[in-house]
Amino acid sequence: MGKDLTRRGFVRTAAGGSAALVWLSARRAPTVFAAQADKPALLGGTPMHQGGWPKWPQWDESWEPEIVEVLRSGRWSSAGGGGQVVDFETAYAKLLGANRCVTTASGTTALITSMHVMGVDAGDEVITSPYTFIATYNTILMLKALPVFADTDPATLTMDPASIESRITERTRAIVPVHIYGMPCDMDPINAIAKKHNLAVVEDACQAWLAEYKGRKCGTLGELGCFSFQNSKHIPAGEGGAVTGDSDELLDRCHAFHNCGRAFGTFKGSGCFSRGTNCRMMHYAAALLRQEIDKLVTDTKRRQENADHLTAGLQEIPGIQPVRLPENSRAVWHLYAFRYDADQFHGLPRDKFIRALRAEGVPCSGGYGEQYYDGLLDEAINSRGFQRLFPAERLKAYRGSLQELKGNKQVCETTVAVFHSTLLADRSDMDHIVEAIRKIHAHGAALAT
Ligand SMILES: Cc1ncc(COP(=O)(O)O)c(C=O)c1O
């Protein structure tokens, strides 16, 4: 750099006149980086990343013999007990450090099973997170209970424990924290509130296989934990789920419920049967899942290392705020999410930022929206069943209280998320993501117009 070329001058020179590359420090005028002179792909430049990303799910031919053996045996259903399903349940419980595991047909049915066993019933209320896959809402509604939403902490994207207590009523039966995107909720205060008010805690860990909080795995932090093994998940079987926990009594009840209500272990029900459903896993799904465990462990480590690298790069970019995790916890990144501040990108709207990032070859999305306004809750609270179960004033107040979810609204409007298989790529590919965002940052003004 020439003697008389100051840093400011260098950046201006490198920018080739781009207004976005002027070195200013005011809030609406972002800091810039030298390596961003390329034109954004959305404006006709070359994409920062080319050559695609790892596909998901991934198949390993070495898994085939065991699965074919199950298929040839004709013993596909787990109704008779034993076999591959029990082998997987034993292995999954051990992996998590849980005493027991009962597999189910899906994460949805794992949640229904767990909440039923914890006594959630018609006319109850369940406090949960609004920032989740819609199945969390649906499972509570299926039990004819009302999902009451704690607010989302914009820094963590998970349930803000400070917003729980004011939402507890005499109808509240359980808290369902959701470890969304594989990021552990702050479970200590949640468990303390549950204990104080005598509420059950069922973890929705459907996106959090092997995530850790204070040395323990998600899914072992409440009374029962629920997992999904659906096609997109880190340990996929097309469909599948599991309930984990330490209490033999609760897990026996889960087993009974998921197996048509047949008495199981210590749980005799009322004679032979109690209320239940059929949401058993099939043996060939279990044969696949058990063999995927080693891959889950190695993939998780890789996702975590790449996510750490990504976070280190992204936190240097003004307007990009990586997610804050609870102290002494480890996320597994079902989606890698960060918050986006359009002000730091010359007002470039979040949706256009997403389009620009996709154009750079980085697949991403805006995550969940304000789903409580999408019609599902209105349909439920206007239904005959809910109108019989809840006083009209309660349903009116409930509908009105959705406006109080200010943190969640902010999260829905400002989050950007990258799919987990992207984190299985090479370290240098993570640099492409960082550089792509730096490029968009540098050209925010041009992109915003
Ligand atoms: C947070 C969360 N809860 C519940 C579920 C339901 O799981 P499933 O699709 O296996 O029924 C999912 C699945 O996507 C999920 O992500």
Image: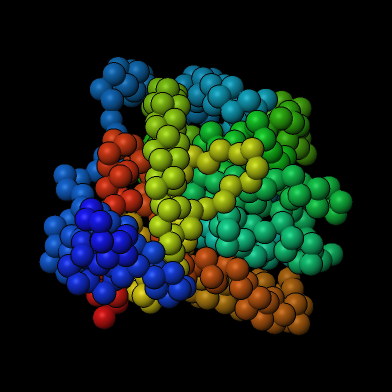
Residue at 55% in and 72% down: 409
Residue 442 location in percent, x, y?
Answer: 29, 65
409 vs 419, left or right, is right
Q: Residue 231's quadrant in the figure?
A: top left
Q: Quadrant of residue 445?
A: bottom left
Percent across and percent down for residue 425 are 29, 37
Q: Nearer the viewer, residue 444 or 409?
A: 444
Mark yes or no: residue 108 visible.
no
Which quarter of the figure has residue 139? bottom right
On screen, residue 300 above or below 362: above
**Image point (21%, 49%), residue name:** 49
Q: Is residue 270 left or right of residue 140?
A: right
Residue 291 x, y percent position in the rendering: 40, 22
Of 152 and 446, the residue lying toward us: 446
Q: Residue at x 35, y 67 (%)?
A: 23
Q: Where's residue 128, x and y in %?
A: 65, 58
10 or 267, which lies in front? 10
Question: Could you tell whether 67 is left or right of 113 in the image?
Answer: left
Residue at 69% in and 38% down: 221
> From the image, which quarter does the C terminus lie in?
bottom left
Left or right of 84 on screen, residue 259: right
